Image: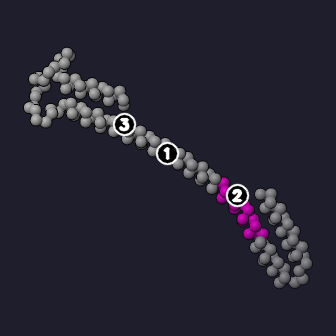
């Protein structure tokens, strides 16, 4: 910003000296035309660049935060997928315990061997498996 102000000051000084040295109106008009064009370009470049750099830095910070949030979301999604796999495995185990083996006759719950609690053995094992699954979740 100081550099831009110094350039403008030098340019205006040179423009004034050149303008005073011009003899007729046409020369003064040409000096003003080219001098103000150059001064306007310098001012536009330096004073337009600073806000643009600030916006770019803010955008980069926002992009970093978004990337970090996306990475965290991916980690959370991976954990959720792992839990889902555990649940599916547990459900398959419970299905295996409750479904009679192929080739055997279908038994009713009352006709199976009972565990000490009075429940059929397959149901007891299924309940234990469900409790284990619930603890893991």
Q: Nearer the viewer, residue 120 or 51?
A: 120
**Vertical order, 24 against 7 (above or below):** below
Inter-mark Cα distance, 2 to 3: 50 Å
The local crowd at label 3, few if under 14, some if 14 to 19, many if 20 or more residues have their Cα within 10 Å, is some
**Vertical order, 107 against 84 (above or below):** above
- Which quarter of the image is occupied by the C terminus? top left
- For the record, the magenta segment spans 39-55
Residue at 80% from the left image edge and 74% from the top image edge: 35
Which of label 2 and label 3 is nearer to you?
3
Locate residue 136 relative to residue 37 in the image: left or right: left
Inter-mark Cα distance, 2 to 1: 32 Å
Residue at 15% from the left image edge and 33% from the top image edge: 101
Residue at 18% from the left image edge and 20% from the top image edge: 119
The percent coordinates of residue 108 (x first, y second) are: 10, 27
**Secondary structure at numbered mark 3:** helix
User: Which quadrant of the structure image shows residue 112?
Assistant: top left
Locate residue 58 relative to residue 105 in the image: left or right: right
Q: Main secondary structure of the magenta part?
A: helix
- Total count of labels: 3
**Would you say residue 42 sits in the magenta stretch?**
yes
The residue carrying mark 3 is 83
Residue lying farthest to the left in this orientation: 105
The residue carrying mark 1 is 71
The local crowd at label 2, few if under 14, some if 14 to 19, many if 20 or more residues have their Cα within 10 Å, is few
The percent coordinates of residue 91 (x first, y second) are: 26, 35
């Amino acid at each position: 910003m100081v550099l831009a102000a110094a350039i403008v000051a030098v340019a205006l000084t040179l423009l004034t000296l050149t303008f005073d040295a011009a003899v007729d109106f046409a020369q003064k008009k040409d000096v003003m035309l080219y001098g103000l064009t150059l001064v306007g370009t310098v001012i536009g470049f330096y004073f337009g660049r600073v806000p643009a750099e600030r916006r770019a830095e803010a955008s980069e910070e926002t992009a970093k935060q978004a990337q970090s949030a996306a990475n965290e979301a991916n980690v959370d999604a991976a954990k959720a997928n792992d839990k889902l796999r555990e649940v599916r495995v547990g459900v398959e185990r419970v299905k295996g315990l409750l479904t009679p083996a192929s080739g055997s006759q279908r038994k009713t719950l009352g006709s199976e061997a009972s565990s000490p609690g009075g429940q059929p053995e397959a149901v007891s094992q299924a309940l234990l498996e469900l409790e284990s699954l619930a603890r893991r979740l």
